[in-house]
Image (tube, rainbow, N blue to C red):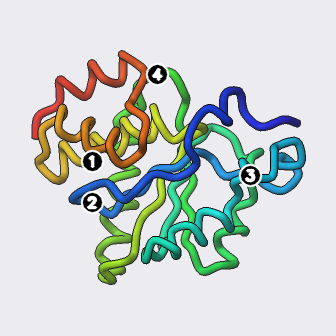
Amino acid sequence: MPPPDRWDKYGSLGEVISGTKFVAFKVPLKKELLSTVHEDERFGPEDVIERLKDKGKELGLVIDITYTDKYYHKGEFCRKNVEHEKIYTYGHVVPTDAVVYRFFDVVEKFIKRNKKEEMVIGVHCTHGVNRTGYIVCRYMVERLGIDPTEAMDAFKEARGHPIERQNYIDDLLTRKQ
């Protein structure tokens, strides 16, 4: 099986989003899926942990919002003492409130237990842009009181890619802080 469609068109890992503990990235792939990827472009679970460590950050939690388990084994994170939460989230459609509020709950429980300044929460969908951007920006708007446009701008700056799906953007713009 090859990597997901257009996976190679997106940067692997963004920066920590200003004012948050979030770092967005594209789905890391297990070794079997990386066999067809050029060595310089490979990006797996260990790469996420190591690249964040190189930036002085410690990955404490990964929230996977893809709608499949085929890309990697969560044990690759858990063996490195990184918590992992799977929230099955359909692509192309605005996530349901049940998905969004489960995400909020997971994030808030993690933050309560982990006070270390350098500890971050990794969030990914397939490309780390649309579902990821939407759900992180919803959190920024509804829980941190950030204006929707400012939240999307901060996401774009940190991730290196803007949210692309207009339905996600339109929905975010209706949200109140």
Q: Label 3 belongs to which residue?
A: 40
Give the foreground label among 3 and 2.
Answer: 3
Residue 93 bears which disc, if any?
4
Going from N to C along the chain, the mark reached first, 3 or 2, is: 2
Name the side, left or right, on which 129 lies relative to 31: left
Where does label 1 land, which residue? 139
Q: Residue at x 47, y 36 (%)?
A: 129
Callout 2: few (<14), some (14-19), or many (20+) C-alpha neighbours within 10 Å? some
48 left or right of 116? Answer: right
Residue 20's label in the rendered image is 2
Q: Amino acid at mark 3?
A: Asp
Q: Earlier in the sequence, mark 1 or mark 2?
A: 2
- Residue 119 at x, y percent in the picture: 39, 75
Mark 1: amino acid: Tyr
Distance, label 3 to label 2, CA atoms, is: 29 Å
- Which residue is drawn at the image coordinates 22% and 41% (left, top)? 151
Q: Residue at x 88, y 51 (%)?
A: 32
